[in-house]
Amino acid sequence: MKGRGGAVPRVKGRNASAALAVRPARRDEIGVALVGWGTIGSGVIKLLEDRRREIDARLGARLRLVGVADIDLKRKREVEVSRALLTSRTQELIRDPKVDVVIELMGGLEPARTFVLDAIAHGKSIVTANKALLAHHGTEILAAAEARGVGCRFEASVGGGIPIIRTLREALAADRQTAVFGIVNGTSNYILSTMAAAGRSFAEVLADAQKAGLAEADPTYDVDGIDAAHKLTLLVQLAFGVRVALDAVHTEGIRDVDASDMEYARELGYAIKLLAIAKDHGNAIEARVHPTMIPAHDPLAAVSGAFNAVCVHGDALGRSMYYGQGAGMMPTATAVVADVIDVARDLRELGRPRLAPLGYPIARQRVAKVRPIGDVMSEFYLRVHAQDEPGVLGRIASLLGQQKISIASVVQRARSSGGVVPIVIRTHETRERDLRRALDRVAKMPSVRGKPVAIRIEENPG
């Protein structure tokens, strides 16, 4: 048997194909470009420098920082970078032939999307922590990476340093996941935890968190549940193999949660957490983000401060929980650098990614209906402020009963100033649509003051 290169030895046996396979020459150096020199970018640079020997030893090659791109190169950072590495010409850097992996940490949708797609088009592997980008443009970006045959990793986009992406993509690949849920926004969890512990209002705790740098000056994405919804769309794709549009995720924040709700929850044996919840019912899935009462004995109830925790429920494994720091410079940078090592190892060993970004070809994503929030069944905690007068509780109960909502228990406290009394009701399981219809009528009662508050109760989120 002859070819262009002369005689080719015959190989017999089961290892014949392996012996004839052409492997790429192992590379001694992998070039990395960092786009976005903020807090997390500074942590990445610090890790690459402080742990250079250990990283290179694990990789079996040198991981070299080729350049750092940012729009503002004069602002003081937590780490120093050689001026020779700095540039504001991002496209030139990501197209540099010496660059193999581009780390995108600039955040936002544009120009991040343009830069990432341009890097992929030029054969660069991508590592990103940008959950908003992936929630809005993930299908386009992941499909482009698959088609070009480059790596795309995004562990740091959900849960900071918690390896939940890798766990769902690889460690749990043999199981069928039926639910994924958890605390995925550290700012909201810090606020709720502090409200519960100190008995303080949302506004007070938020103001203190902003002063301490634990909350942004504009906290909308965190406290209104938007950040958690971004992350849930990624978890659903990994856990269920289903793509969910961001606008299909029912999203509520924590602004309406009061210190009194924390107190009532404790009395009833619950804790209030902002949960991202997804459940796979086969013909439809649930995908929702909202404040939730969970039993005080549930492991999620003990997750406090800025920590995150994600629970996964599988047919074979049952429930498992993954817990750790959900944000911060070094926890998030740890996840980013781990992804860089992962794609660099693939480049060195195989010359291509070992796995698709989601662990399966994106073309095989299932099409599933997202169950409207109005169709979701749940128990509810209700808080209504009403004028303390004869028959008011009975009229509220009657309006609930007209929508076939069954009351499990009632707590009625002594009147406050102005003769207003808080009425706390726990319902049996009911359809969301029916509850909202009833509460609209309750809110219109002449004796009711303010908007009734409803918080879903999940005895067993999974």
Image: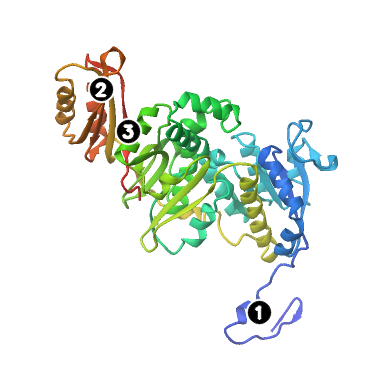
Amino acid carrying label 1: it is Ala
Q: Which residue is mark 2?
A: 414
Question: What residue is shown with label 3?
Answer: 264
Q: Determine whether, in the image, residue 119 is placed left or right of residue 413.
A: right
Any part of residue 419 in sight: yes
Residue 29 vertical placement versus 106 (above, below): below
Q: Position of residue 108 (x, y in %)?
A: 60, 34
- 92 versus 397 height, above or below: below
Which mark is on residue 339?
A: none
What's the CA distance linking mark 1 and mark 3?
69 Å
Q: Are circles 2 and 3 on residues that touch, CB within 8 Å?
A: no
Looking at the rendered structure, the kind of residue marked 2 is Ala
Per the rendering, the mark at residue 19 is 1
Query: Which comes sooner in the sequence, label 1 or label 3?
Result: 1
The residue located at (73%, 36%) in the rendering is 70
* Direction from residue 130 to residue 252 in the image, left or right: left
- Quick one: label 2 or label 3, which is nearer the N terminus? 3
**Type of amino acid at the residue the image marks with label 3:** Tyr
Q: Name which of mark 1 and mark 2 comes first in the sequence.
A: 1
Callout 2: SS = loop
**Residue 75 percent location from the top left of the image:** 76, 30
The alpha-carbon separation of the residues under discs 2 and 3 comes to 14 Å
**Most foreground residue, 373 or 16:** 373
**Residue lying at 65% horizontally and 85% vertically, measured from the top left:** 11
